[in-house]
Image: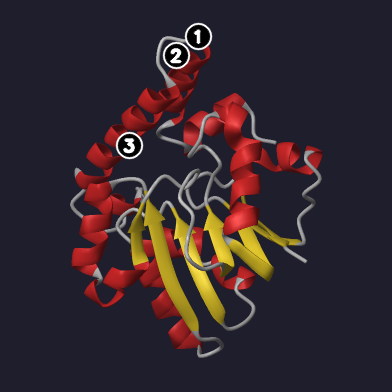
Amino acid sequence: MRDESTKKRINRAYEFDEEQQKLLDEGKITEEKWYQINKQFFTKNYLASDNPRGQSGHSGDEFHYFHSHSMLLEAVNKNGSFIDVGCANGYLLESLDKWIKSLGYYHIDFYGLDISEELIELAKSRLPQWNDKLFTGNAFTWVPTMKFDFVCVKELNYVPRDKQRDFLKHLLDHYVVQGGRLIWKPDLENKLLSWGFEPTGYIEKSHHKYKDVPRKLLWWDMG
């Protein structure tokens, strides 16, 4: 489990996240306001970037982006559908599509969801061929019309901390098809284990910038 100093090093939004959670816990903002503030903060910061990686929330160059996200190739193990929950401008979907096609292993239909209308509009302008597969909505309340073989949730901080278990249940109930796979980052690994979700598999490598920090990706198979 990462300590606070490590989280501060690798998460540029760490202090913002902590501040908003504190305001919510103290009753100074409502849950609705919490979602609104988060959406505005990340939309503004992502759109301020001059490159598609930054507009998806990544601060490194293309090599570092590949280093960070190519681990997902280990989690995709068959043909099927894949949704990125919190897809921003769709750069991860675009990259995975390119990498998987270059390997020639599987055929994947990609979908994306984000709470930010502006980021989804950017994604649609960048990826017009996927316009009908990019959705705007709060992942905690949005219910898709289909379920997916692969559901990628980069973090559970898309919802307040006391709602994270309910959020996970919502994803399993409404997003993941029977026999499908839920993919997540490890920051809440201990909490997930306490809820009875032991990973089916994982991959680990060093952080591209901080070599003493492991970067880990876990997945859990449903059924």
Mark 1 / mark 3, whichever is N-terminal: 1
Q: Quadrant of residue 29?
A: top left
Residue drawn at point x = 52 percent, y = 50 percent: 154
Mark 2 / mark 3, whichever is N-terminal: 2
Residue ID for mark 2: 23
Q: Secondary structure at mark 3?
A: helix
Which numbered disc covers residue 171?
A: none
In the rendered image, the vertical position of residue 92 relative to residue 16, given as above or below? below
Which residue in the protein does label 3 denote?
39
Up/down of 150 relative to 171, above or below? below
Residue at 59 percent across and 32 percent down: it is: 163
CA separation in Å, label 1 and label 2: 5 Å
Front-most of residues 70 and 19: 19
Relative to 41, does residue 199 appear above or below in the rendering? below
Q: Looking at the image, do the residues carrying marks 1 and 3 touch, with CB atoms under 8 Å apart? A: no
Identify the residue at image location x=36%, y=24%. Answer: 33
Asked whether the beta carbons under mark 1 and mark 2 sit within 8 Å of each other, the answer is yes
Residue 43, image x, y percentages:
27, 41
- The quadrant of the picture occupied by the N terminus is top right
The three-letter code of the residue at mark 1 reads: Glu
Badge 2, how many Cα within 10 Å: few under 14, some, many 20+?
A: some
Residue at 54% from the left image edge and 59% from the top image edge:
152
Q: Identify the residue under disc 1.
A: 26
What is the x, y in percent for residue 174?
Answer: 58, 57
What's the amino acid at mark 3?
A: Lys
222 left or right of 66 in image: right
| 171 relative to 195 in the view: left or right | left
Determine whether the residue tagged by mark 2 lies in a helix, strand or loop.
helix
The reply to whether residue 79 is in sight is yes
Instruction: Residue 112: give x, y in percent of width and height.
Output: 40, 62
